[in-house]
Image (cartoon, helix red, strand yellow):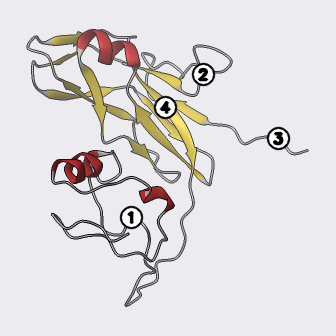
Amino acid sequence: MSQAPSLLIKKLSDKARLPTRGSAFAAGYDIYASKVTVIPARGKALVDTDISMAVPAGTYGRIAPRSGLAAKHFIDTGAGVIDADYRGQVKVLLFNHSDADFQVAEGDRVAQLILERIYTPEVMEVTELEESVRGAGGFGSTGGFAAQVAQAVGISTAGAADAPSDAAPAAAGEKPSS
């Protein structure tokens, strides 16, 4: 059995800390701030970590929020993808959704790094795509809102899950045929 590849970390200063996991089953590695940074109220800032890394081939690092910062202080992360070939300093983009400035101290855990496997197939242009049940339904199309609208305009959705996949949907305001 071969050994799993390692997450390689380079400290860029003596203020850098290696990422750590809070427990044996933690999905993410805590990422630490290397200097004091103020995230302005309703604003954003980049937080230095003074680390660079090499994530294993076939993975990328996703910078994810820490639940405590989000729940207690309205601090969220953004734009956090670390590609396997990136070797620069990892910085964490933090958004402050509160009405008060938020100070990050040196050594604070500011985000978590989650390694995710990726699949990168070749891109192929086509003139048509195979039809699907969902079709072009976008934001909110699978969350039940459509059933509420159908009910409001008098369209029955009973048995919709049992309907044949080739059945045409009824137009708004039109009763479906039995």
Q: Nearer the viewer, residue 131 or 166?
A: 166
- Residue type, numbered disc 4: Leu
Q: Looking at the image, is mark 3 or mark 2 earlier in the sequence?
A: 3
What label does residue 107 carry, if any? none
> Which residue position holds label 4?
113
> Which residue occupies 36% across, 18% down?
34
Q: Looking at the image, is mark 2 or mark 1 earlier in the sequence?
A: 2
Disc 3 versus disc 2: distance between alpha carbons? Answer: 20 Å
> Which residue position holds label 1?
134
Disc 1 versus disc 4: distance between alpha carbons? Answer: 33 Å
Image quarter of residue 74: top left
Quarter of the rendering occupied by the N terminus: top right
Disc 3 versus disc 4: distance between alpha carbons? Answer: 21 Å
> Which residue position holds label 2?
26
| Residue 170 appears left or right of 162 | left
> Depth-wise, is mark 3 or mark 2 nearer the camera?
2
> Which residue occupies 49% across, 18% down?
17
- Residue type, numbered disc 3: Gln
Image location of residue 166, percent across then percent down: 45, 77
Image quarter of residue 79: top left
> Depth-wise, is mark 2 or mark 1 nearer the camera?
1
> Which residue position holds label 3?
3
Q: Looking at the image, is mark 3 or mark 4 earlier in the sequence?
A: 3
- Residue type, numbered disc 2: Ala
